[in-house]
Image (spheres, coloured by chain):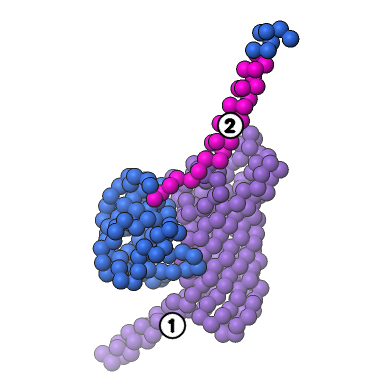
């Protein structure tokens, strides 16, 4: 009986300590930017869910495609209806790991270069990605940043030839998340 | 120039001007005014959340991209940079309380205060979808 109680308490403590290793946000920022001969297009999503487990380096993002806001309503409409088809594929996600976890000291404030590798899923198309970024470690907070490019064709996003000079086939993604200790 | 040619030229010019005007009007059409938008659904906050929890695919088809008016007990207000979130919580998860998160329109940022927490509140907003943890309403206005 006593052994079982100790085991249950140990598991409880372990669960609590693992939970404490999580840093999360529901207000992360992701911007995409397309630079093309006829126009530049920018959209911003500030409702990104993200979680980082500093004990094993697991890093996840999840966002709603309809939370991307454009300057022009027509662009936003075309983005949701014609390109990403938000009614069929409402979410996008990333699930991966920090590759160089051993180079980051989460107990010591500072800015660390990171390499994150994982699966990026948009429109139900999943691609392996490996990107560089930074993690700024603060007291009870971590700021994650990364800028990288993706090819729209890799995610089943087709650009009609009529607007090929309006939309770049490769777009820049900027990620900024302020993760707080849970 | 002959009369028929002048008429043709005038019509062509007017046609080009009209087409350009229509193009720019459509291209620059304003975003929906969600504060004035009529709700597609009026539902309790709890029933909206339950709909997504029980069958998120069916709920996404019904509620995503619609203007929804919800009423429920306000659990919390969250302030980040320039935004205010009204929270209706129905569970707990790795991100903290889970439920419906409503991003208020800028001109409604001060419509709710800590004194409203625990009281019935009605909010109208655009449903962006379900993140797996929360139902997201954006461009929200506080009705009471």
Which of A28/B109 is in front? B109
Residue A85, given in percent of the width and then of the height, sits at 49, 44
Residue tagged 2: B21
Could you tell whether A87 is left or right of A159 in the image?
left
Quadrant of the drawing holding the C terminus of chain A: bottom left
Residue A140, given in percent of the width and then of the height, sits at 51, 80
Chain of the residue under label 1:
A
- Disc 1 is placed on an element classified as helix
B32 is within the stretch colored magenta: yes
Report which colour depicts chain B: blue
Residue tagged 1: A17
Residue drawn where x is 57% and y is 66% of the image:
A176
Part of the protein shown in magenta = B8-35
Quadrant of the drawing holding the N terminus of chain A: bottom left
Residue B30, given in percent of the width and then of the height, sits at 50, 43
For residue A148, what is the image quadrant?
Answer: bottom right
**Is residue A122 visible to us here?**
yes
Report which colour depicts chain A: purple
Residue drawn where x is 27% and y is 52% of the image:
B43
């Amino acid at each position: 009986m006593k052994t079982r109680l100790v085991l249950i308490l140990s598991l409880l403590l372990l669960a609590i300590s693992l939970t404490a290793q999580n840093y999360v946000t529901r207000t992360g920022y992701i911007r995409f930017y397309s630079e093309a001969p006829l126009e530049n297009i920018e959209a911003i999503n500030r409702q990104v869910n993200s979680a980082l487990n500093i004990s094993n380096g697991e890093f996840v993002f999840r966002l709603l495609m309809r939370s991307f806001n454009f300057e022009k309503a027509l662009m936003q409409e075309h983005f949701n209806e014609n390109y990403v088809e938000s009614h069929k594929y409402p979410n996008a996600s990333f699930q991966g790991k920090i590759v160089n976890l051993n180079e980051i000291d989460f107990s010591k404030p500072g800015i660390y270069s990171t390499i994150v590798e994982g699966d990026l899923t948009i429109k139900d198309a999943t691609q392996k990605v490996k990107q560089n970024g930074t993690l700024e470690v603060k007291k009870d907070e971590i700021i994650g940043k990364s800028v990288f490019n993706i090819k729209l064709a890799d995610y089943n996003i087709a650009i009609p030839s009529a607007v090929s000079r309006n939309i770049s086939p490769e777009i820049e993604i900027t990620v900024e998340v302020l993760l707080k200790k849970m | 120039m002959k009369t028929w040619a002048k008429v043709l030229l005038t019509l062509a010019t007017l046609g080009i001007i009209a087409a350009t005007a229509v193009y720019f009007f459509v291209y620059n059409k304003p975003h929906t005014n969600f504060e004035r938008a009529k709700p597609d659904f009026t539902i309790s906050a709890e029933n909206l959340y339950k709909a997504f929890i029980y069958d998120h695919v069916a709920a996404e088809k019904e509620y995503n991209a619609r203007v929804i008016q919800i009423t429920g007990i306000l659990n919390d207000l969250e302030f980040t940079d320039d935004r205010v979130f009204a929270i209706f919580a129905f569970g707990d998860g790795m991100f903290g309380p889970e439920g419906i998160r409503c991003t208020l329109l800028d001109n409604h940022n001060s419509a709710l205060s800590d004194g409203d927490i625990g009281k019935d509140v009605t909010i109208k907003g655009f449903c962006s979808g379900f993140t797996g943890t929360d139902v997201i309403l954006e461009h929200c206005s506080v009705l009471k």
